[in-house]
Image (spheres, rainbow, N blue to C red):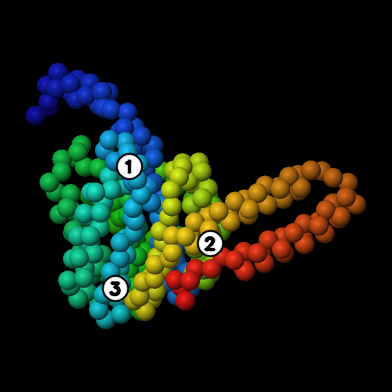
Amino acid sequence: MLKPVRDRRERHRLRLLKPRTEHIRKRLMTVAFASKCEGGACLYADRIIIGTNGSISEACKIWHRNLTNNRAIALATATSDFDAAQTLAERILDGVASTNFNTIEEIRNYVEGHLLTWSEPYHSGELALESFFLMATAVAGAVHLHFLQPRHTIVPVPHARVIGIGEPVAKPIVDGLLPENVFVSPQVTLLRLAYAAKRAKEQAVGRGGSNAILITSSGTTRAISEIELKFAEEVSDMVSGTLDSIGQFLMALEPPEQIETLATQWQGFLAATAKLLTDHVKFTGLD
Protein backbone atom coordinates (compact mmCIF):
# COMPACT_ATOMS: atom_id res chain seq x y z
CA MET A 1 0.00 0.00 0.00
CA LEU A 2 1.33 3.45 -0.89
CA LYS A 3 2.33 5.70 1.96
CA PRO A 4 0.17 8.82 2.48
CA VAL A 5 1.48 11.85 0.63
CA ARG A 6 1.99 13.74 3.86
CA ASP A 7 4.30 10.97 5.13
CA ARG A 8 6.43 11.16 2.01
CA ARG A 9 6.60 14.94 2.34
CA GLU A 10 7.63 14.63 5.97
CA ARG A 11 10.45 12.21 5.11
CA HIS A 12 11.61 14.64 2.41
CA ARG A 13 11.53 17.50 4.91
CA LEU A 14 13.58 15.52 7.41
CA ARG A 15 16.17 14.66 4.76
CA LEU A 16 16.55 18.37 4.00
CA LEU A 17 17.05 19.07 7.70
CA LYS A 18 19.81 16.48 8.17
CA PRO A 19 22.80 18.10 9.87
CA ARG A 20 25.69 19.25 7.73
CA THR A 21 27.78 16.49 9.25
CA GLU A 22 25.96 13.98 7.05
CA HIS A 23 27.15 15.96 4.02
CA ILE A 24 30.67 15.96 5.41
CA ARG A 25 30.62 12.19 5.92
CA LYS A 26 29.57 11.58 2.31
CA ARG A 27 32.02 14.08 0.85
CA LEU A 28 34.90 12.54 2.78
CA MET A 29 33.99 8.91 2.18
CA THR A 30 37.29 7.24 1.64
CA VAL A 31 39.26 5.21 -0.88
CA ALA A 32 40.65 1.67 -1.09
CA PHE A 33 42.54 -0.35 -3.69
CA ALA A 34 43.15 -3.97 -4.59
CA SER A 35 45.66 -5.23 -7.15
CA LYS A 36 47.12 -8.59 -8.02
CA CYS A 37 50.91 -8.80 -8.13
CA GLU A 38 53.61 -11.39 -8.48
CA GLY A 39 52.88 -14.14 -5.99
CA GLY A 40 49.71 -12.64 -4.52
CA ALA A 41 47.71 -9.45 -4.17
CA CYS A 42 47.87 -6.12 -2.30
CA LEU A 43 45.09 -4.32 -0.45
CA TYR A 44 45.60 -0.60 0.25
CA ALA A 45 43.27 1.80 2.09
CA ASP A 46 43.38 5.23 3.65
CA ARG A 47 42.69 5.63 7.39
CA ILE A 48 40.08 8.40 7.56
CA ILE A 49 37.07 7.78 9.83
CA ILE A 50 34.17 10.25 9.77
CA GLY A 51 32.08 10.17 12.95
CA THR A 52 28.32 10.65 13.06
CA ASN A 53 28.95 14.10 14.57
CA GLY A 54 31.36 15.08 11.80
CA SER A 55 34.51 14.38 13.82
CA ILE A 56 37.52 13.10 11.88
CA SER A 57 39.82 10.40 13.23
CA GLU A 58 41.97 7.58 11.86
CA ALA A 59 41.85 3.79 12.08
CA CYS A 60 42.92 0.78 10.07
CA LYS A 61 40.26 -0.24 7.55
CA ILE A 62 41.89 -3.50 6.50
CA TRP A 63 41.11 -6.71 8.39
CA HIS A 64 42.72 -10.10 7.81
CA ARG A 65 42.97 -13.66 9.07
CA ASN A 66 45.61 -16.32 8.51
CA LEU A 67 43.73 -19.60 8.26
CA THR A 68 44.67 -23.27 8.37
CA ASN A 69 45.70 -25.30 5.33
CA ASN A 70 47.64 -22.46 3.68
CA ARG A 71 44.60 -20.20 3.43
CA ALA A 72 44.15 -16.51 4.21
CA ILE A 73 41.52 -13.82 3.76
CA ALA A 74 41.58 -10.02 4.00
CA LEU A 75 39.01 -7.24 3.57
CA ALA A 76 39.50 -3.52 2.91
CA THR A 77 36.71 -0.95 2.96
CA ALA A 78 35.84 2.51 1.74
CA THR A 79 32.84 3.58 3.78
CA SER A 80 30.84 6.41 5.28
CA ASP A 81 29.94 4.20 8.28
CA PHE A 82 33.07 2.67 9.79
CA ASP A 83 31.33 0.87 12.68
CA ALA A 84 28.91 -0.94 10.37
CA ALA A 85 31.70 -1.81 7.93
CA GLN A 86 33.94 -3.16 10.70
CA THR A 87 31.11 -5.28 12.12
CA LEU A 88 30.38 -6.85 8.74
CA ALA A 89 34.07 -7.42 7.93
CA GLU A 90 34.81 -9.12 11.25
CA ARG A 91 31.75 -11.34 10.98
CA ILE A 92 32.77 -12.47 7.51
CA LEU A 93 36.35 -13.17 8.58
CA ASP A 94 35.32 -14.97 11.76
CA GLY A 95 32.81 -17.04 9.81
CA VAL A 96 35.29 -18.09 7.14
CA ALA A 97 37.90 -18.84 9.82
CA SER A 98 35.49 -21.20 11.58
CA THR A 99 34.94 -23.30 8.45
CA ASN A 100 37.19 -25.49 6.35
CA PHE A 101 36.37 -24.18 2.87
CA ASN A 102 38.91 -25.41 0.34
CA THR A 103 37.65 -23.70 -2.84
CA ILE A 104 36.98 -20.10 -3.78
CA GLU A 105 33.45 -21.09 -4.81
CA GLU A 106 32.66 -22.26 -1.27
CA ILE A 107 34.04 -19.05 0.23
CA ARG A 108 32.21 -16.88 -2.29
CA ASN A 109 28.87 -18.61 -1.65
CA TYR A 110 29.36 -18.25 2.10
CA VAL A 111 30.21 -14.54 1.86
CA GLU A 112 27.26 -13.84 -0.44
CA GLY A 113 24.92 -15.56 1.99
CA HIS A 114 26.43 -13.62 4.86
CA LEU A 115 25.91 -10.31 3.05
CA LEU A 116 22.23 -11.12 2.69
CA THR A 117 21.89 -12.24 6.32
CA TRP A 118 23.63 -9.12 7.61
CA SER A 119 21.45 -6.87 5.43
CA GLU A 120 18.17 -8.55 6.33
CA PRO A 121 17.23 -6.38 9.35
CA TYR A 122 17.56 -3.20 7.29
CA HIS A 123 14.82 -1.71 5.19
CA SER A 124 15.81 -0.74 1.67
CA GLY A 125 15.92 2.98 2.44
CA GLU A 126 17.90 2.49 5.64
CA LEU A 127 20.72 0.24 4.46
CA ALA A 128 23.93 2.21 4.09
CA LEU A 129 24.92 1.37 0.52
CA GLU A 130 27.98 3.59 0.78
CA SER A 131 29.99 0.76 2.29
CA PHE A 132 32.16 -0.94 -0.31
CA PHE A 133 34.64 -3.78 0.25
CA LEU A 134 37.54 -5.41 -1.55
CA MET A 135 38.23 -9.01 -0.54
CA ALA A 136 41.46 -10.92 -1.14
CA THR A 137 41.41 -14.67 -0.58
CA ALA A 138 44.24 -17.20 -0.75
CA VAL A 139 42.98 -20.74 -1.23
CA ALA A 140 44.26 -23.81 -3.08
CA GLY A 141 47.52 -22.07 -4.01
CA ALA A 142 45.92 -19.05 -5.73
CA VAL A 143 44.82 -15.54 -4.75
CA HIS A 144 41.41 -14.22 -5.76
CA LEU A 145 40.04 -10.66 -5.57
CA HIS A 146 36.36 -9.70 -5.23
CA PHE A 147 34.34 -6.50 -4.94
CA LEU A 148 31.63 -6.64 -2.26
CA GLN A 149 28.67 -4.41 -1.49
CA PRO A 150 25.66 -5.16 0.70
CA ARG A 151 23.02 -6.46 0.07
CA HIS A 152 24.30 -9.22 -2.19
CA THR A 153 26.88 -7.88 -4.64
CA ILE A 154 30.03 -9.98 -4.96
CA VAL A 155 31.93 -9.58 -8.22
CA PRO A 156 35.33 -11.07 -9.20
CA VAL A 157 38.13 -8.54 -9.79
CA PRO A 158 40.39 -9.85 -12.58
CA HIS A 159 43.33 -7.57 -11.85
CA ALA A 160 42.84 -4.26 -9.99
CA ARG A 161 39.98 -2.20 -8.55
CA VAL A 162 39.48 1.17 -6.84
CA ILE A 163 36.50 1.92 -4.58
CA GLY A 164 35.23 4.94 -2.69
CA ILE A 165 34.92 8.64 -3.32
CA GLY A 166 38.49 8.77 -4.63
CA GLU A 167 37.76 6.30 -7.45
CA PRO A 168 37.25 8.89 -10.25
CA VAL A 169 40.68 10.36 -9.51
CA ALA A 170 42.58 7.14 -8.81
CA LYS A 171 41.11 4.70 -11.35
CA PRO A 172 42.78 6.22 -14.46
CA ILE A 173 46.09 6.24 -12.60
CA VAL A 174 45.75 2.60 -11.52
CA ASP A 175 44.68 1.57 -15.03
CA GLY A 176 47.80 3.22 -16.43
CA LEU A 177 50.34 2.08 -13.84
CA LEU A 178 48.95 -1.41 -13.20
CA PRO A 179 47.62 -2.55 -16.59
CA GLU A 180 45.61 -5.75 -16.87
CA ASN A 181 47.57 -9.01 -17.16
CA VAL A 182 50.86 -7.29 -16.22
CA PHE A 183 51.96 -8.49 -12.79
CA VAL A 184 54.82 -6.64 -11.10
CA SER A 185 56.49 -7.26 -7.75
CA PRO A 186 54.63 -6.47 -4.50
CA GLN A 187 57.09 -3.61 -3.85
CA VAL A 188 56.40 -1.98 -7.22
CA THR A 189 52.66 -2.57 -6.83
CA LEU A 190 52.63 -0.84 -3.44
CA LEU A 191 54.63 2.13 -4.71
CA ARG A 192 52.23 2.62 -7.61
CA LEU A 193 49.22 2.29 -5.32
CA ALA A 194 50.82 4.86 -3.00
CA TYR A 195 51.08 7.26 -5.93
CA ALA A 196 47.40 6.74 -6.80
CA ALA A 197 46.36 7.06 -3.14
CA LYS A 198 48.18 10.36 -2.71
CA ARG A 199 46.51 11.82 -5.80
CA ALA A 200 43.09 10.66 -4.54
CA LYS A 201 43.72 12.16 -1.11
CA GLU A 202 44.71 15.50 -2.62
CA GLN A 203 41.60 15.82 -4.74
CA ALA A 204 38.91 13.79 -3.00
CA VAL A 205 39.77 12.46 0.46
CA GLY A 206 42.04 15.21 1.66
CA ARG A 207 44.22 13.92 4.50
CA GLY A 208 45.26 11.01 6.70
CA GLY A 209 47.55 8.01 6.62
CA SER A 210 47.22 4.63 4.93
CA ASN A 211 47.40 0.90 5.60
CA ALA A 212 48.32 -1.91 3.23
CA ILE A 213 48.68 -5.66 3.30
CA LEU A 214 50.10 -8.32 1.02
CA ILE A 215 48.31 -11.65 0.84
CA THR A 216 50.37 -14.37 -0.80
CA SER A 217 49.25 -17.39 -2.80
CA SER A 218 50.80 -19.60 -0.10
CA GLY A 219 48.27 -18.30 2.43
CA THR A 220 50.24 -15.72 4.45
CA THR A 221 49.54 -12.03 5.10
CA ARG A 222 52.15 -9.31 5.58
CA ALA A 223 51.21 -5.88 6.93
CA ILE A 224 53.13 -2.86 5.65
CA SER A 225 54.38 -0.15 7.99
CA GLU A 226 52.31 3.05 8.05
CA ILE A 227 55.53 5.09 8.10
CA GLU A 228 56.84 3.39 4.98
CA LEU A 229 53.53 3.97 3.20
CA LYS A 230 53.56 7.63 4.19
CA PHE A 231 57.09 8.00 2.85
CA ALA A 232 56.09 6.31 -0.42
CA GLU A 233 53.14 8.67 -0.78
CA GLU A 234 55.27 11.73 -0.10
CA VAL A 235 57.96 10.60 -2.55
CA SER A 236 55.25 10.25 -5.17
CA ASP A 237 54.92 14.05 -5.15
CA MET A 238 58.32 14.17 -6.80
CA VAL A 239 57.13 11.74 -9.47
CA SER A 240 54.01 13.83 -10.06
CA GLY A 241 56.07 17.00 -10.43
CA THR A 242 58.43 15.25 -12.82
CA LEU A 243 55.57 14.07 -15.01
CA ASP A 244 54.13 17.59 -15.14
CA SER A 245 57.51 18.96 -16.21
CA ILE A 246 57.88 16.30 -18.89
CA GLY A 247 54.46 17.21 -20.25
CA GLN A 248 55.49 20.85 -20.45
CA PHE A 249 58.70 19.87 -22.25
CA LEU A 250 56.91 17.67 -24.79
CA MET A 251 54.41 20.40 -25.62
CA ALA A 252 56.84 23.34 -25.62
CA LEU A 253 57.27 23.27 -29.43
CA GLU A 254 60.97 24.02 -29.09
CA PRO A 255 63.34 24.13 -32.14
CA PRO A 256 64.80 20.68 -33.02
CA GLU A 257 68.28 21.48 -31.73
CA GLN A 258 66.87 22.66 -28.41
CA ILE A 259 64.77 19.51 -28.12
CA GLU A 260 67.88 17.34 -28.45
CA THR A 261 69.69 19.28 -25.73
CA LEU A 262 66.75 19.19 -23.31
CA ALA A 263 66.12 15.51 -24.00
CA THR A 264 69.68 14.66 -22.98
CA GLN A 265 69.23 16.62 -19.74
CA TRP A 266 65.93 14.87 -19.02
CA GLN A 267 67.47 11.46 -19.56
CA GLY A 268 69.94 12.02 -16.76
CA PHE A 269 67.31 13.50 -14.47
CA LEU A 270 64.92 10.58 -14.99
CA ALA A 271 67.68 8.06 -14.30
CA ALA A 272 68.59 9.86 -11.07
CA THR A 273 64.94 9.97 -9.95
CA ALA A 274 64.40 6.26 -10.64
CA LYS A 275 67.58 5.42 -8.71
CA LEU A 276 66.44 7.52 -5.76
CA LEU A 277 63.15 5.61 -5.60
CA THR A 278 64.95 2.27 -5.88
CA ASP A 279 67.39 3.17 -3.10
CA HIS A 280 64.93 4.68 -0.61
CA VAL A 281 61.47 3.15 -1.04
CA LYS A 282 61.67 0.01 1.09
CA PHE A 283 58.73 -2.01 2.35
CA THR A 284 60.44 -4.07 5.03
CA GLY A 285 57.25 -6.00 5.80
CA LEU A 286 57.70 -7.82 2.51
CA ASP A 287 61.03 -9.35 3.57
Q: Secondary structure at mark 3?
A: strand
For the N terminus, the quadrant is top left
Q: Residue at x 37, y 47 (%)?
A: 48
**Residue 66 numbered mark, or none:** 3
Q: Answer with the quarter of the image where residue 99 lies.
A: bottom left
Q: Residue at x 86, y 55 (%)?
A: 260
Q: Does label 3 or label 1 sit earlier along the sequence?
A: 1
Residue, disc 2 = 191
Q: Residues within 10 Å of mark 1 (few under 14, many from 20)?
A: many
Q: Tell me the CA gap for discs 2 and 3.
A: 24 Å
Q: Does label 1 or label 2 sit earlier along the sequence?
A: 1
Residue, disc 1 = 50
Q: Tell me the CA gap for discs 3 and 1.
A: 29 Å
- The residue at the far top in this view is 6
**Residue 206 numbered mark, or none:** none
Going by the numbered disc 1, the residue's amino acid type is Ile
Going by the numbered disc 3, the residue's amino acid type is Asn
Viewer-side residue, 108 vs 262: 262
Q: Residue at x 79, y 43 (%)?
A: 252
Left or right of 174 in this view: 7: left
Left or right of 130 in this view: 3: left
- Measured as percent of width and height from the top left, residue 4 is found at 11, 21
Viewer-side residue, 230 vs 14: 230
Residue 75 in view here:
yes
Left or right of 44 in this view: 196: right
Going by the numbered disc 2, the residue's amino acid type is Leu
